[in-house]
Amino acid sequence: MTRDDETPATAPSTSLWSSIHRNIGTIKDYAELMGAVLVLLGGIMAYLQYVDGQRKEQEDLGERAYAELQDSYFEFLQICLQYPELDCYDRRPLGAVCLTENQERQQTILYAMIVSVFERAFVRYEVSQPPRRAQQWPGWVKYMEGFADREGLRAVWADVRDEYDAGFQVFFDGVLQRVPVAKTPACTPIDAAAAR
């Protein structure tokens, strides 16, 4: 055979190689594109997982803050139950009682405790998400207003006001301005043995 006879036999194989080479190049391009798409999808998935983790963390933080606030409030209520004559619960006693010097000191401490709980509620709900604030904040405001008419609480607030969050100071001053001071009935002396 002559060389001319061999040329037609090798031509199809060169054409096949170039076709395979072109297809490999196209496959490589597709693979690179698919890799980029997968990296992009992976980045999006990682971002969504991060956002979901942040949301769950905020929910957990909110639940912990709520539980701590409730614990503080419950502690305050237990003390009010032990010392009902100190007029530190939101309902008025049937008749005002003259307090001893020790009881006045206890009442002052209890008012300072409830103001501290009020501040925690304010800070908690001031930064919380709107749905939770909308559900729980009005109850706290009403509760604060229930205390705002007491002269004893106002006296404590005047003494400790500067120790609290600046936003809470403005807010609670507004509550005190809205609610008039209650007329305090004449007190009934209690005997020293009954005083705690």
Image (cartoon, rainbow, N blue to C red):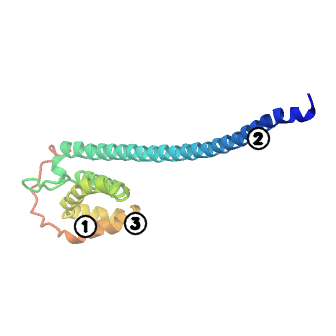
The quadrant of the image that shows the N terminus is top right
* Label 2 sits on residue: 18
Q: Residue furthest right?
A: 2
Residue under the image location 32 percent in, 43 percent down: 67
Q: Tag 1: residue type?
A: Val
Residue under the image location 77 percent in, 39 percent down: 15
Q: Residue furthest left?
A: 94
- What is the x, y in percent for residue 113? 31, 52
- What is the x, y in percent for residue 104? 24, 55
Res. 124 mark: none
Relative to the observer, which residue lies in front, 82 or 10? Answer: 10
The quadrant of the image that shows the C terminus is top left
Secondary element type, mark 2: helix
Q: Neighbour class for label 3 at 10 Å: few (<14), some, many (≥20)?
A: few
Q: Tag 2: residue type?
A: Ser
- What is the x, y in percent for residue 110? 27, 52
* Label 1 sits on residue: 175
Can residue 170 be seen from the camera position used here? yes
Q: How far apart are marks 1 and 3 (CA)?
A: 14 Å
* Label 3 sits on residue: 166
Residue under the image location 40 percent in, 45 percent down: 61
Closest to the camera, between mark 2 and mark 1, is: 2
